[in-house]
Amino acid sequence: MKKIFLSVLSITFLANAQDLESRVSDLEKKVKMLEEKLNRLEQAPAQNISIVKKEVIPENAISFSVLEKKFKKSDNQFDRNDYIVLKAVVINNTNKTLKAIDGVLKIYDNSGKELISKNIRIEKGMLNLTGTKIKPAEKLERIIEIVYDEDKEGYKIVKDTPLNQLKIEFIPISLEE
């Protein structure tokens, strides 16, 4: 009985060993193929790489103005950040209906020194009764909260300077239709 058991065990071991060897050899072949493909891609000339041109957005496509600036201290245990809060009006001056507007918000002092630069996304939102798209010539009021970084001098200046002594501009990067 022991001899039969040992012979069956050795046969299964050999069968599994051959199966594992074939799997390992298959994996080695795949690795070699991937290495060759990677080498071909690395050696390909730079001319084959396509460069996507960005859409040029006219300066007057989006009107942006800030009505009010406030500083909001963190007031509860769940929100530990202080914020510079801007109440802004955005107008879609294009003849297109937009889902969102991506851009850069830049804040300068009177001398033209850049104090803050932040990427922001302006959307209409899901809770608006008039739909989620920004229609042509539509005027949106938005609250923009910038996390206050007390270690950066520009943030301190923006916090302490009145709105009329700051220059705030919004540069649209992309218009999502």
Image: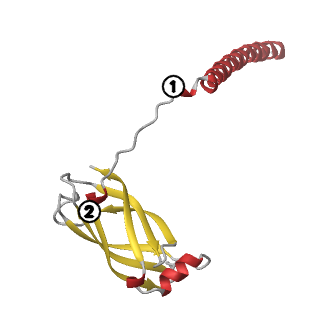
Q: Quadrant of residue 103?
A: bottom left
- Residue 163 vs residue 74, the one in the foreground: 163
- Residue 123 x %, y %: 30, 61
User: For the residue marked with disc 2, what is the amino acid?
Assistant: Met
List the residue tagged with mark 1.
Answer: 48
- Residue 158 x %, y %: 48, 80
- Residue 171 x %, y %: 38, 61
Q: Quadrant of residue 128?
A: bottom left
Q: Is residue 121 visible?
A: yes
Q: Which mark is residue 126?
A: 2
- Measured in 3D between alpha carbons, the distance from the residue under mark 1 to the one under mark 2, in whole angstroms, is 42 Å
Q: Which mark is residue 121?
A: none
Q: Is residue 54 left or right of residue 41?
A: left
Q: What's the residue at 19%, 60% (across, down)?
A: 131
- Residue 116 vs residue 77, the one in the foreground: 116
Q: Reply above or below: 9 against 55.
A: above
**Can you say which quadrant of the picture contains the N terminus?**
top right
Mark 1 or 2: the one toward you: 1
Q: What's the residue at 49%, 83% (across, down)?
A: 159
Does the residue at mark 1 contact the one at mark 2 (Cβ under 8 Å)? no
